[in-house]
Amino acid sequence: MANGAPQSFQNHTRWVPMYHFVASALLILNLGYAVAGFIRQVSFGTVVQLLLAVALLIIFFYSRAFALAVQDRLIRLEERLRMERLFPGDLRDRISELSIPQMIGLRFASDGELADLTRKVLDEKIENRTEVKKLIKTWRPDNARA
């Protein structure tokens, strides 16, 4: 973590200021400028400028979405391997029942509480990754996220 504090539910969200604040603000400003130009004078040039501004915003959002989708797939693989190593036989057979949001939430659970927490999540059908994360008592940080 940037502030040196141990990672927890309260501070685990990762913000990249140049991406989340600067780049997004510049792209929104660019879109506003393109809309204003289009409103002032409809021409081929202003239409192209507006379409380009929209395309840049689409690329901005999808680039993050694609990276997060790949990250989620990697988390699923890592957690499956971890669970296969840590779980007793009966719970190991239930790994395939876990959804991606459940696995993403469980990745922060320590090895000692992972099995019991997984049983609870499966038995109570807790699907929301945020709700799963809130159940964790001993946080296992993930500092290598995209």
Image (cartoon, grey):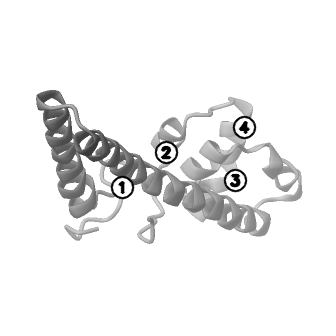
Which secondary structure, mark 2? helix
C-alpha span from label 2 to label 4: 14 Å
C-alpha span from label 4 to label 1: 24 Å
C-alpha span from label 2 to label 1: 10 Å
Is residue 117 in sight in this rendering? Answer: no
> Disc 2 marks which amino acid?
Lys
Q: Quadrant location of the C terminus? A: bottom left
- The part of the image, by quadrant, that contains residue 2 is bottom left
* Left or right: residue 109 compared with residue 53: right
Mark 2 vs mark 1: which is more N-terminal? 1
* Left or right: residue 61 compared with residue 102: left
**Position of residue 47 measured from the top left corner of the image (x, y, whole percent):** 29, 39
Mark 2 vs mark 4: which is more N-terminal? 4
Q: Which residue appears at 31% of the width and 48% of the height?
A: 10
Mark 4 vs mark 1: which is more N-terminal? 1
C-alpha span from label 3 to label 1: 22 Å
Residue 25 is tagged as none
Q: Mark 2 near mark 1, Cβ–Cβ under 8 Å?
A: yes
Mark 3 vs mark 1: which is more N-terminal? 1
C-alpha span from label 3 to label 2: 14 Å
Q: Which residue appears at 50% of the width and 60% of the height?
A: 67
> Disc 4 marks which amino acid?
Leu
- The foreground one among 89 and 23 is 23
